[in-house]
Image: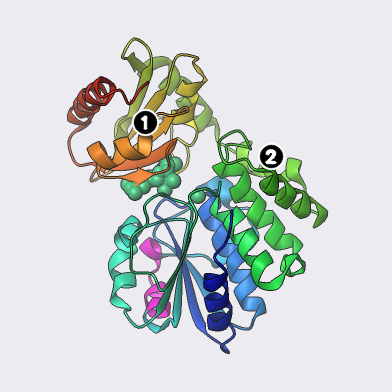
Amino acid sequence: MELSEKHIVSLRELLARPRLRIVIVSHTNPDGDAVGSSLAWAEVLRSLGHEVLCVVPNKYPYFLDWMPGIDEVVIFKTDAEGRARQAVEQADVIFCLDFNAISRLEILSETIAANTAARRVLIDHHLQPDAGFDIAFSHPESSSTCYLVYRLVEALYGREAITRRMAELLYVGMMTDTGNFAFSHLTPDLFRAVADLVEKGISIPEIHNNVYNAYTEGRARLFGYAINRKMELIEDGTVAYMSLKENEMRRFQFQQGDSEGFVNYALTIRKVKMSAMFLAHRKFIRISLRSRGDVDVNLFARRYFNGGGHKNAAGGKSYLTMEETIDHYIRSVREFAAEGHLG
Ligand code: 5GP
Ligand code: MN
């Protein structure tokens, strides 16, 4: 991965100004990569003397509660005092981390779009980013935004600038976005970065345990229910889907983040090339898509569900009922297969 020297120079110049008011925003349903990269980048900016606030549209999952500094992240949805709105209105610079289009901020989009004076900097690894950023570090070949932030800090201020605390935060995103170093974009340089984080003193078993072994009993039982009762296979067993309605989620005391990993599980079946999860929200259905190898779910999500993401992990939304959404999925899969996209 090569970072643009021109962009590095522009960013270094921008950050050399004294006492900037900076807001870092990340995507709706923030995950380990979103929160980890935001908090680590915030620390770097604060060490330069800037005033920084991290904002996310809605709550991150509870298994990230232990992350150093997470209490300072302002959740826009429940921000009664309007701290986030005020910080965004007054910001000199807005950093957009781990997403590629302002619309991905959903309830926060309008507020961000309203500040037209701030410089906007994108640091992201999703495919096909929107235009309109003053500086864009868009690297779909990076396995996570955390790895991108690592490389950015290295290029700007050297590896010495990375503290142990930042190392912990960055490791979370590197680990979660690669499915614990099992997916694509696993370059030698990524492992060299991990080695550096280990040298900074992070404990990999501890971080792993904090993130992956911290679920509730309800989540474990919901997982069993979803796999046993709700997983369906179509297209001769090569395509899977699963759905959860609100009453089913309530039955297992569902909390945000509890369905994490469900969609991946169908891909443990040898024949399955593509998997979908439909999760009911109050006003719409959120869709998660995963695939193996050459099957491009970014394309599928863009075409059929008004979404996007990465080649092997993408998502979208549906405003139809659950039954209609599933029908639409099955028909779309058939068309996608007929065009040869499922190999
Ligand atoms: P997840 O299934 O983990 O929520 O999302 C998988 C990937 O797809 C993530 O990288 C996420 O940012 C992206 N993604 C999820 N939903 C949407 C969406 O509605 N629109 C776009 N453009 N990307 C999405
Ligand atoms: Mn990410």
141, above or below 47, in the image: above
Q: Which of marks 1 and 2 is nearer the N terminus?
A: 2
Residue 67 in sight from this viewpoint: yes
Percent x, y of residue 120: 41, 73
Residue 231 in sight from this viewpoint: no
* Amino acid type of the residue that numbered disc 2 sits on in the rendered structure: Asn
18, above or below 262, in the image: below
- The magenta region covers 76-88
* Amino acid type of the residue that numbered disc 1 sits on in the rendered structure: Met
Coloring applied to the structure: rainbow
**Outermost residue toward the bottom in this view:** 18
Q: Is mark 1 within 8 Å of ligand 1?
A: yes
Q: Residue 55 colored magenta?
A: no
Percent x, y of residue 249: 37, 33
Tag shown at residue 277 = 1
Mark 2 surroundings within 10 Å by alpha-carbon count, few (fewer than 14), some (14 through 19), many (20 or more): few
Side (left or right) of 79 relative to 322: right
Residue 99 picture quarter: bottom left
Instruction: Indicate the secondary structure of the residue bearing disc 2.
Output: helix
The residue under label 2 is 209
Instruction: Indicate the secondary structure of the residue bearing disc 1.
Output: strand
For ligand 1, the image quadrant comes to top left
Q: Residues under labels 1 and 2: Cα distance? A: 25 Å
320, 33: nearer the viewer: 33
20, 133: nearer the viewer: 133
Task: Please report the residue visible at 36 percent of the width from the left and 19 percent of the height from the top.
Answer: 239
Percent x, y of residue 101: 34, 58
